[in-house]
Amino acid sequence: MTITLRERTQTGATTKGSALTWSELDGNFIHLDNATPISVKNYGAVGDGVTDDTAAIQAAITAASGKIILIPDGTFNVTSKLTGISNINITGSGTIKNVNTSGATDISILEFSGKSNFRVHGIRLVGANKSLSLAYGLGTGIYIVDCNDFDISDNDISLCTHQGILINVVAASSARGRVNRNTIQTGNATNFSGDIDLAAQGNFAMTDIEVVGNHCLSSNGTGIGVTQVGSTNLISDINIVGNFVKNKLRHGIYTYSGTDFTFACNRINISLNDIRECDWIGIYQSGD
């Protein structure tokens, strides 16, 4: 039997100059969920665990504004980062595997920079598990920088050299995002790198982020980290709720707000988390 996947673009989406409300965001995701999925195999990806599928997957993503990109069953190898776009839903039952062989650095598997209204749902990402100390944005499963209105949920992320999921603010403010129900088990992450990290740098804000119901199972680094390095009150309205964190080399949940607490994080709700077997402290706020 042959199944033909036909393209249908998103219609009726809400757009505006500022971050969407949760209701508007959910409405946009409903439109994205109702679009017809386009398989990366339509763009030449093979998924045999041997072929380098980087260019084919990137071509599918680039052409998919307002559509669902389907990662079907199989293992799709990539050797350089995949760059996400706005207004897209990436989903499926397949695996994207980082097979980058550089000994000096590593890639992030999927990166969204300055984008909005996107969802990554239900896929598996496998990192290269290198023993390296890396800067933010390298060696991560999903790297989100300066983005608004996103949903990263129900993914399985393993063996990344650095974070499983990193949300970073560098050159523009970021608001309204969900990181829910992911299972993350990074590889050789060192220092305070988390399975899930939120970081605000410079003079740009991060607000209204949910981190709910995730399983953080790595043996290295920190489970969930919130780091503010910049002017005052840049991270606010963060909900870290109902996560399961186990077997951490350092803290279970960690917040950092400058060397003397000058850079205060406002309205961070840490509640109903199950934290077990951490070598350091279950929940730790640091000003050092």
Image (cartoon, rainbow, N blue to C red):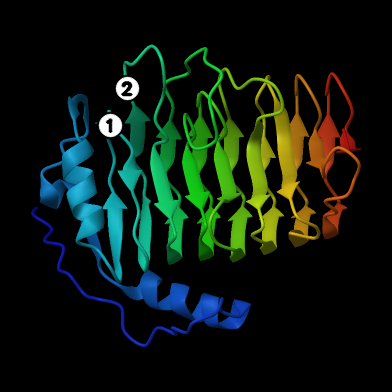
Disc 2 is placed on an element classified as loop
Along the horizontal axis of the image, is 59 left or right of 77?
left
Question: Who is closer to the viewer here, 255 or 184?
Answer: 255
Type of the residue with mark 1: Val
Say above or below: 35 vs 230: below
Whether the residues at callouts 1 and 2 have beta carbons within 8 Å, the answer is yes
Along the horizontal axis of the image, is 55 left or right of 120?
left
Along the horizontal axis of the image, is 221 left or right of 44?
right
Report the residue marked by disc 2: 100
Question: Who is closer to the viewer here, 57 or 255?
Answer: 255
Question: Who is closer to the viewer here, 257 or 55?
Answer: 257
Q: Position of residue 94 (x, y in %)?
A: 33, 40
Q: Residue at x 35, y 30 (%)?
A: 97
Type of the residue with mark 2: Asn
Q: Residue at x 45, y 54 (%)?
A: 121
Q: Position of residue 51 (x, y in %)?
A: 16, 27
Tell me the tag on residue 154: none
Q: Quadrant of the rendered structure where residue 67 is? A: bottom left
Say above or below: 243 vs 120: above
Report the residue marked by disc 1: 78
Q: Residues within 10 Å of mark 1 (few under 14, many from 20)?
A: many
Say above or below: 133 vs 236: above
Q: For the residues marked 1 and 2, what is the alpha-carbon distance in whole angstroms?
A: 7 Å
Q: Position of residue 181 (x, y in %)?
A: 62, 50
Question: Who is closer to the viewer here, 91 or 16?
Answer: 16
> Which quarter of the image is occupied by the C terminus?
top right
